[in-house]
Amino acid sequence: MRLPLIAGNWKMNGLRAEATALASEIRTALDRTPAEGVDVLICPPFLALAPVQEALAGSSIRLGAQDVHWEAKGAYTGEVSTAMLREVGCVFVIVGHSERRHIMGETNEHVNRKVKAAVAQGLTPIVCVGELLEERSMGDTYNVIERQIRRAFDGMPAADVARTVIAYEPVWAIGTGKTATPHQAQEAHRFIRKLVAKIAGPEVGEGTRILYGGSVKPENAKELMAQADIDGALVGGASLNAESFVRMVRYRE
Ligand code: 13P
């Protein structure tokens, strides 16, 4: 049984006061009427993690970061370690987001190191994969996804793969308003689940949460979440408004 996870990726949005206000608004709404049977996660920018953690103290909303470095400490100017994230209350970390891959030049090798470091240090990585529009047009979608996933999990025992979450985020659907159809998303998720089963065994395949990301909004969340292999959503733009985020958390209602 995979508990759905609705995650907000705030990306590079929110000064501390705004981030705290948004987190508090989400918290108040969910405290008033808790959402049953769903995990809720918010991933603010690094500098807002500590104040957001305070705003969420005592609530069941989880905190996550948007990136992490693989080394424990040392001369890595500008980077943030797993221990630093844990210290401010993070339990999840997004790894290999398409914006990091395509804007910051992150490679599958970097993603692999980050996933391993996160798992080793008790953070749950949300491993992002997804194809570019050109790759989809060329019929290359599944090759791209397979390569990204195999390399992200390279050298990891099945027990560690079991401690990850995967997010399928087709790059052409991110921030564009063009959502994958529920059918397209389901096909990709099914493919990913089978691949995880091949890599780490059927139980891990069956148990791994696979989130969909790319222009998820209150209007389409329910239909996406109704697909057999979609276990949650990684939401960008529509997570920056408390009312719309909470509506997605309550996608069943
Ligand atoms: P949007 O929901 O804004 O399309 O962003 C998706 C995303 O990249 C979440 O990580």
Image (cartoon, rainbow, N blue to C red):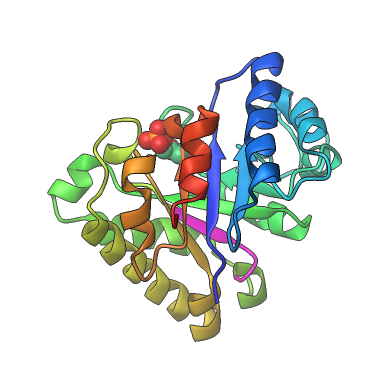
Residue 74 sits inside the magenta stretch: no
Residue 25 in picture, x, y percent from top left:
64, 29
Which quadrant does the C terminus fall into?
bottom left
Q: Quadrant of residue 19?
A: top right
Q: Which residue appears at 63% of the width and 26% of the height?
A: 22
Residue 121 in picture, x, y percent from top left:
78, 55
Farthest right residue in view: 87
Relative placement, left or right, of 130 versus 92 is left
Q: Quadrant of residue 189?
A: bottom left
Residue 233 in picture, x, y percent from top left:
46, 50
Farthest front residue in view: 32
| Front-lying residue, 231 or 223 | 223
Considering only vertical position in the picture, is 253 above or below 214?
below
Question: Taking the image as drawn, is residue 106 in sight?
Answer: no
Question: Taking the image as drawn, is residue 66 in sight?
Answer: yes
| Front-lying residue, 137 or 113 | 137
Considering only vertical position in the picture, is 205 above or below 149?
below
Q: Which residue appears at 37% of the width and 49% of the height?
A: 221
Relative placement, left or right, of 76 versus 146 is right
Q: How many marks?
A: 0
Residue 164 sits inside the magenta stretch: yes
Which stretch did the figure color magenta?
A: 162-167
